[in-house]
Amino acid sequence: LNPEPCRLRPCPPGAKVTHSAAMEKHHIRDVLISADDIRARVDRLVVEMRDACHGDNLVMIGILRGSFIFLADLVRAVERPLQVDFLVVSSYGTGTVSSGNVRLLYDPATDLAGKHIVVVEDIIDSGRTLTRLVELLRARHPASLAICTLLDKQIAPKPPAELRFVGFHAPPAFLVGY
């Protein structure tokens, strides 16, 4: 893992970020990471994945809804054939803290046996959802299983061993947007 640290700070002058009325409405104080920084890190993550995930049969599975844009950016940058599928997992209910009770609401249609799976997540909080999800996916006998996340809050007591690709370390705050 070679994540980049991020600090809660306003973006530097000239960065492609504007404070909008929507940010004000939702009480968003600052931009954590600029679009340019995310773009550059996505490019480096794709290189890391290319070097680690050899062979054909690459399947990227996005955990909806949060990972959708991040997954799209990764897929556009990958220069090899791959499949894309999705999972819908619920562990938050109506709150902002994971309950630890993981429910699979949508299952991938793709047969995962013998394939190289990269699960794409937007933010890792407690790690409970991913730990349970890894158990479910391992039962499908993939050739390999790795996790890629844009943000890791580093608060999981025991991060999943499959966590191989981390975009940025993030503060343990409630984070929104991409």
Image (cartoon, grey):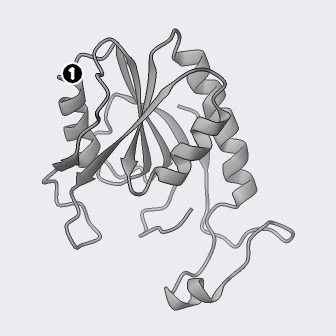
Observer-nearest of 134 and 141 = 141
User: Which residue is outermost to the right?
Assistant: 14
| Residue situated furthest top in the rendering | 55
Residue at the extreme left of the image, as rendered: 101
Query: Which x, y percent locates residue 54?
Result: 53, 11
Residue drawn at (36%, 47%), measured in percent from left and top? Answer: 63
Residue 119 can be seen in this image = yes
- Image coordinates of residue 93 in percent, x first then y, are 19, 67
Residue at the extreme front: 109
Vertical arrangement, residue 138 with respect to residue 152, above or below = above
Q: Could you tell me if residue 157 is visible in this image?
A: no
Q: Amino acid at mark 1?
A: Arg
Q: 64 and 95: which one is in front? A: 64
Which of the 4 image quadrants contains residue 163?
top left
In-image side of 154 versus 35 (left or right): left
Task: Count every numbered label the image shows and give the total.
Answer: 1
* Camera-side residue of 171 and 57: 57
Q: Classify 10 Å Cα crowding around label 1: few (below 14), some (14-19), many (20 and above).
A: few
Q: Position of residue 120 (x, y in %)?
A: 44, 40
Question: Measuring 60% from the left and 50% from the top, which residue is drawn there?
Answer: 5
In the picture, which quadrant includes the C terminus?
Answer: bottom right
| Residue drawn 62% across the image and 31% down it | 46
Secondary structure category for the residue under label 1:
loop
Q: Is residue 20 left or right of residue 173?
A: right
Residue named by callout 1? 140
- Indicate the position of residue 29 as horizontal and vertical percent values: 58, 81
Give the image quarter of residue 116. Answer: top left
Q: Does 164 appear above or below 178?
A: above
> For residue 16, which quarter of the picture?
bottom right
